[in-house]
Image (tube, rainbow, N blue to C red):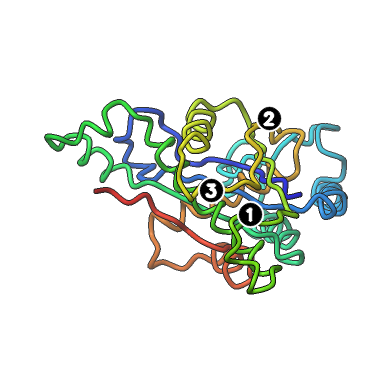
Amino acid sequence: MYLVFLSESGQTGLSADDPSQPHHVHAGLLVQESQYISMSGEYDALVRRHFGAPAGTDGVPNELRPGDLYQGKGYFRSWRPERRGELIQDCLSILIRREIPLLVSYIDKARFLSASNTEGNSIYGNTDPSQLAFSRFLLALTMFLDENVMAQMNPDDIMQSVWNVNDYAMLMAGSQSNSIALGLSEFLSEENDSVTPNMYDDLMIAPASTSVGGQLASLCAYIIRRWLQQPQAGHGYFDALRDGRVLQVVYPYQFD
């Protein structure tokens, strides 16, 4: 079973006009149950190596806040850029060594505002742009899961109406999120061919402070959002995720 650790970056609610956060990003790390114990153990060792003590003890933070770590704020304000960079790279290396799939969706908030203000486009109304972006994430997830099933099938069986599903996906959100809960409920209620039978309809809560998968997903979401703001600039962390066969797709919300 895949544990799909979800995270968001760029959350501004219904207010979509923050120029410092022009995109809302949803990211999900697909971790096989069999990988999670070793991944957590490696992360715990990484924390001890960089901080000198386990997370949540002796002044070590319970979780790594991506914005603080990336920009040298909060706990990391006294850390040199090189030291912060080493910690980020070590975190990403956990994913790269295992080739943990990362799926990403996003929405351009300026385009959302433009579409919302267009006469006759009542479809957007007061909809949270996060929910729209999450709908694209779920579509990307179903396509990824279906492709995995097809890769394990005999070509003659692909045309059958019922597929044997071996890998299921359990969604693990970092916190209670109306946009994620509503998006999942709406997506699964749609009666169309895009809804996959290998996704559980329950949403589990796995706070980043107690979830290694959640922390790493948060870091990835932040890195992708930074890349979206200036895709032509150099982004070593983004390149590492892409070239390390972790990043599978960056799926934009398409406006009509």
Residue at numbered disc 3: 222
- Residue 27, position in %: x, y? 55, 48
Q: Residues within 10 Å of mark 1 (few under 14, many from 20)?
A: few
Q: Nearer the viewer, mark 1 or mark 3?
A: 1
Quadrant of the image occupied by residue 118: top left
What element does badge 2 sit on?
A: strand
Q: Is residue 37 left or right of residue 78?
A: right
Look at label 1 and name its amino acid: Val
Q: Nearer the viewer, mark 2 or mark 3?
A: 2
Residue at numbered disc 1: 162
Against 192, residue 176 (above or below) is: above
Against 13, residue 70 (above or below) is: below
- Residue 146, position in %: x, y? 60, 58
Q: Which mark is residue 205?
A: 2
Quadrant of the image occupied by residue 97: bottom right
**C-beta proximity under 8 Å, tags 2 and 3:** no
- Residue 130, position in %: x, y? 43, 36
- Disc 1 to disc 2, C-alpha distance: 31 Å
- Disc 1 to disc 3, C-alpha distance: 38 Å
Q: In the image as oriented, which residue stretches furthest toward the left?
A: 119
In this view of the protein, which residue sits in the foreground, 222 or 57?
A: 222
Q: Is residue 227 left or right of residue 32?
A: left
What element does badge 3 sit on?
A: helix
Against 69, residue 243 (above or below) is: below
